[in-house]
Amino acid sequence: MNKKTGAIVATVVTALCCGLPGCFSLCFGLISAFASMVPGADIDIGGSSDPQAALLMGLGSVCVGVIFVAIPVVVGFVTLRKKNDPAASFDSSPLPPAA
């Protein structure tokens, strides 16, 4: 397995293990934050019916979701980018004489 295939496998695995739960966390956090602003909403966060608890949990879930979605993006960028190989760009031809 060459490096490119390993990079693709790592990106897909992190997308499934981190990206998908991150998307669910983002959706849950946005819904929870929206529900905290709806008057008369039936809120139950750990036995509390306080809208501020729902808002804080929603914002926390959004932050965690953003981090989880960013992980596959960073892994894909780091593993799939073209690396500059200094040995490959080395020119071994002699320099012309100084005039």
Image (cartoon, grey):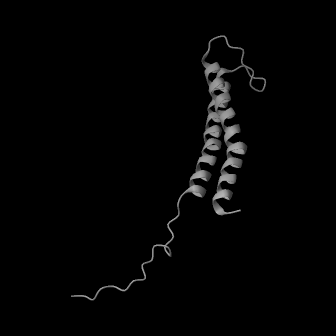
Front-most of 91 and 18?
91
Drawn side of residue 41 relative to residue 91, left or right: right
State which quadrant residue 60 falls in.
Answer: top right
Picture layout, residue 99 above or below residue 80: below
- Residue 58 vs 13, above or below: the answer is above
Observer-nearest of 52 and 80:
80
Q: Residue at x 65, y 56 (%)?
A: 7
Residue drawn at point x = 61 percent, y = 21 percent: 34
Residue found at the very far left of the displayed protein = 99
Q: Relative to residue 88, is residue 33 drawn left or right?
A: right
In depth, the one of 47 and 11 nearer the eye is 11
Image coordinates of residue 57 in percent, x first then y, are 67, 30
**Hey, which residue is sitting farthest front in the picture?**
93
Residue at the top extreme, as displayed? 40
Which quadrant would the N terminus be assigned to in this image? Answer: bottom right
The residue sitting at 62% across, 41% down in the picture is 69
The picture places residue 89, in percent across and down from the top left corner, at 45, 73
Q: Position of residue 61 (x, y in %)?
A: 66, 34
Foreground residue among 71 and 16: 16
Residue 11 position, x and y percent, is 66, 50
Number of labels in the image equals 0
* Quarter of the figure with residue 36: top right
Pick the quarter of the image with the C terminus: bottom left
